[in-house]
């Protein structure tokens, strides 16, 4: 067996070397060890080339500690080798990270060492270089444990003898080969869903079978359905499920009313977006004889209609959340429930589950009550209507709106005194024509009417969680669904504070005052050009919120205990919270924690998937809108800097695009990761995160939902510009960073090598 391998040889792969089989033989075989000849024979390797490749693979495995040579040429698997299991996060065509709970950090893996793993696959990775100060851990995939999914969405490209599907996902770097017999009812450019039948290998594309033809690329409905399919989200209910929903009675019996507290004669109203179709929550208000106020937070009693373990309930759990795309809502529940039975529409009796509080005008809670109720909403306000009435001081229920707004502000003040974080990111909505084409992008502005509703929903969620937490059976707590948000990682906070200092902001954040320091920064950067960049980076330092049965804190809200109770039409965890609370109000025993924890984990996963789909729909519409803006210069802020390009957020439209390294042809630019910038080697031009720049659209790729930008000829004359050196020297056609993402995709074999 040869002892050395050349660099050229070490990067070779051979489809005949089945690493999974090799590892299985060495790890689980009947013999304690195998020699080279035995391994070659068991793997069916007869020719010299294959045996040579096996020798290379064995050398690599010994190098990383997966196997040992135990004498006489026999090899043995090392049970304690530095191998961990994790999920592939394919960042770009050059590398991926493997995210593992078994290791303290993400493991960087070059694409050539991925062993043809795809994004989301569960893999075993051997760690070559351990994590150390200033350096990331690096490794190599040695086994694919489980493939993530077989369905891929993309646009089909037909030729005379075969076709390829170009995936929409920016994390899929192979085109999918489609055999001739699959092409009967498909047109060039159609958007399709493909099931992978063969995974990629050396010089081989993955092979797929067409499951569904969605329609012509570019059609709005087709593209929205494609986004849902890409993220594995259903965009229609099974017909039988719709039929089940339709037969649910709309009548409320006298017996049901008797079981509930009656709020039908108490002033009640809803405040929702102008285009909302389902109304989860309503507020009631009544002045008490002692001068205090009774305010009820009334939530649609979804679980009255959706019984546990029914097909409706199983479908709701499977979806776990409604999905909000740019032009539509894909609901968790069929329309009969979400927009009719459960929706708290005005001038109708509705069944609700309520949290009722006796409050002073200072926002102090004197009493609280939880239970099943019936309401009759007298008025439906849009946020804009409620705001206009409060601003004008005249209109329907103006006195009640003002009073509730003042109490809401006191509740907010109480939260912030206890350490709540005040981040408010800018969201956008689109003005669309009848075909879904974007005509304009409008930033969403949150005013008092939005914040009024938010504070009372937060109050209900918090007090429901605290009520259940304080229940005890002996020493054991009752099972509950909590919404938790952990403390930020101190190292991330430290890194962020170093960056904020470059803009002149001192973030003096110790262990006990992180929230105070971040809130001071929020105030300091308000209205500044760098506000969005710094706020976005600060949010990235935060832990992710999740659903769990563990009663942990919600750092961002400064609540010791917090649940989701107020949106059961669109969130399954709220339905779980309703069921658990009612069970305990009736004196029932604690629910099975393991069962509910599994549902919490699923709900967290589906929430992330839905958020990714929502962002994809926004990016698609942003790209579509910017297709008509190629002749215009835009002011922007550098929002990200990487080795392959510079991200810029356009101020006017809030769209983000990239200036690729390959388009910076005035010099060779080097990536300075520590200082979030790139620097021209000769002209010393620096482009840094947060710089104001002037850009122009170069091209838009709708399939990939990407916007390519270039620097405009002029730079806007603003207070903070990107720093240019006018003595730029000789123009050179040399670039740093990776290949153009779309050009650098590995097309593999079948006549489409790159």
Image (cartoon, rainbow, N blue to C red):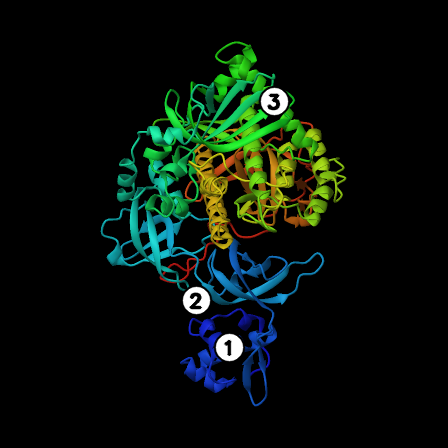
Foreground residue among 714 and 163: 163
Q: Residue at x 76, y 37 (%)?
A: 506
507 shown above or below 476: above
In the rendering, at what x and y percent does residue 613 appear? Answer: 44, 42
* Mark 1 nearby-residue class (10 Å; few <14, some 14–19, many ≥20): some
Mark 3 element type: helix
In the image: residue 690, left or right of residue 709: right
Q: Give the residue at mark 1.
A: 27
Nearer to us: label 1 or label 2: 1
Mark 1 element type: helix
Indicate the quadrant containing the C terminus: top left, top right, bottom left or bottom right. Answer: bottom left
Q: Which mark is residue 627?
A: none
Q: Which residue lies most toward the left here? A: 184
Specify which label sits upstream in the sequence, 2 or 3.
2
- The total of numbered circles placed on residues is 3
Residue 435 in sight here: no
Q: Residue at x 68, y 47 (%)?
A: 492
Q: Give the residue at mark 3.
A: 407
Residue 390 in sight here: yes
Q: Give the residue at mark 2.
A: 202
Q: CA distance from mark 2 to mark 3?
A: 66 Å
């Amino acid at each position: 067996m040869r002892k050395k391998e050349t660099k050229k040889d070490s990067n070779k792969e051979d489809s005949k070397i089945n690493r999974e089989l090799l590892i299985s033989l060495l790890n689980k075989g009947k013999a304690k060890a195998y020699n080279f000849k035995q391994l070659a024979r068991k793997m069916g390797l007869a020719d010299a080339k294959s045996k040579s490749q096996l020798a290379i693979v064995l050398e690599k495995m010994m190098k990383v500690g997966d196997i040992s040579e135990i004498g006489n040429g026999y090899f043995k698997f090392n049970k304690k080798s530095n191998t961990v299991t994790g999920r592939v996060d394919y960042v770009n065509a050059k590398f991926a990270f493997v995210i593992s709970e078994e290791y303290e950090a993400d493991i960087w893996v070059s694409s050539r060492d991925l062993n043809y793993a795809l994004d989301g696959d569960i893999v075993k990775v051997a760690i070559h270089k351990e994590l150390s100060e200033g350096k990331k851990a690096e490794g190599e995939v040695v086994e694919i444990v489980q493939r993530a999914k077989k369905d891929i969405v993309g646009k089909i490209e037909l030729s005379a003898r075969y076709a390829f599907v170009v995936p929409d996902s920016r994390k899929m770097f192979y085109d999918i080969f489609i055999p001739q017999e699959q092409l009967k009812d498909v047109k060039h450019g159609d958007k399709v869903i493909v099931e992978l039948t063969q995974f990629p290998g050396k010089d081989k594309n993955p092979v797929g079978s067409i499951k569904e033809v969605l329609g012509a690329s570019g059609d709005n409905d087709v593209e929205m359905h494609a986004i849902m399919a890409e993220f594995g989200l259903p965009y229609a209910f099974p017909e039988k499920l719709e039929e089940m929903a339709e037969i649910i009675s709309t009548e409320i019996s006298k017996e049901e009313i008797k079981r509930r507290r009656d709020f039908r004669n108490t002033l009640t109203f809803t405040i929702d977006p102008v285009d909302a179709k389902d109304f989860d929550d309503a507020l009631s208000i009544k002045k008490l004889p002692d001068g205090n106020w009774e305010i009820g937070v009334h939530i649609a009693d979804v679980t009255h209609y959706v019984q546990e373990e029914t097909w409706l309930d199983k479908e709701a759990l499977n979806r776990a959340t409604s999905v909000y795309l740019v032009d539509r809502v894909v609901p968790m529940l069929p329309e009969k429930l979400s927009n009719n039975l459960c929706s708290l529409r005005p001038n109708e009796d509705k069944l609700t589950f309520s949290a009722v509080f006796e409050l002073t005008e200072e926002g102090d809670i004197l009493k609280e009550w939880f239970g099943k109720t019936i309401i009759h909403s007298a008025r439906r306000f849009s946020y804009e209507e409620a705001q206009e009435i409060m601003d004008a001081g005249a209109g329907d229920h103006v006195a009640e709106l003002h009073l509730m707004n003042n109490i809401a502000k006191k509740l907010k003040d109480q939260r912030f005194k206890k350490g709540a974080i005040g981040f408010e990111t800018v969201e956008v909505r689109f003005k669309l024509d009848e075909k879904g084409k974007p005509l304009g992008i409008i930033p969403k502005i949150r005013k008092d009417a939005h914040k009024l509703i938010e504070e009372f929903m937060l109050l209900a969620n918090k007090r429901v969680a605290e009520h259940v937490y304080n229940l005890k059976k002996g020493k054991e707590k009752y099972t509950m669904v909590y919404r938790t948000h952990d403390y930020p990682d101190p190292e991330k906070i430290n890194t962020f504070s170093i960056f904020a200092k470059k803009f002149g902001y001192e973030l003096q954040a110790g262990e006990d005052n992180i929230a105070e320091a971040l809130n001071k920064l929020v105030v300091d950067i308000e209205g500044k050009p760098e506000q969005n960049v710094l706020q976005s980076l600060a949010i990235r330092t935060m832990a992710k919120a999740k659903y769990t049965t563990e009663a942990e804190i919600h750092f961002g809200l400064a609540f010791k205990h917090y649940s989701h109770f107020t949106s059961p039409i669109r969130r399954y965890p709220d339905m779980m919270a309703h069921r658990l609370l009612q069970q305990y109000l009736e004196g029932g025993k604690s629910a099975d924690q393991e069962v509910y924890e599994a549902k919490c984990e699923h709900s967290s996963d589906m929430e992330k998937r839905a958020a990714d789909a929502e962002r994809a729909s926004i990016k698609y519409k942003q790209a579509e809108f910017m297709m008509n803006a190629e002749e215009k210069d835009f002011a922007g802020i550098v929002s990200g800097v990487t080795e392959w390009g510079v991200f810029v957020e356009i101020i006017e439209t809030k769209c983000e695009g990239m200036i690729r390294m390959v388009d910076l042809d005035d010099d060779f630019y080097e990536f300075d990761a520590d200082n979030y910038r790139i620097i021209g080697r000769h002209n010393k031009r620096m482009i840094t995160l947060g710089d104001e720049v002037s850009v122009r659209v170069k091209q838009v790729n709708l399939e990939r939902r990407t916007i390519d930008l270039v620097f405009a000829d002029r730079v806007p004359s603003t207070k903070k510009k990107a720093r240019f050196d006018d003595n730029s020297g000789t123009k050179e056609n040399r670039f740093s960073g990776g290949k153009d993402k779309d050009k650098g995709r590995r097309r593999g074999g079948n006549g489409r090598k790159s």
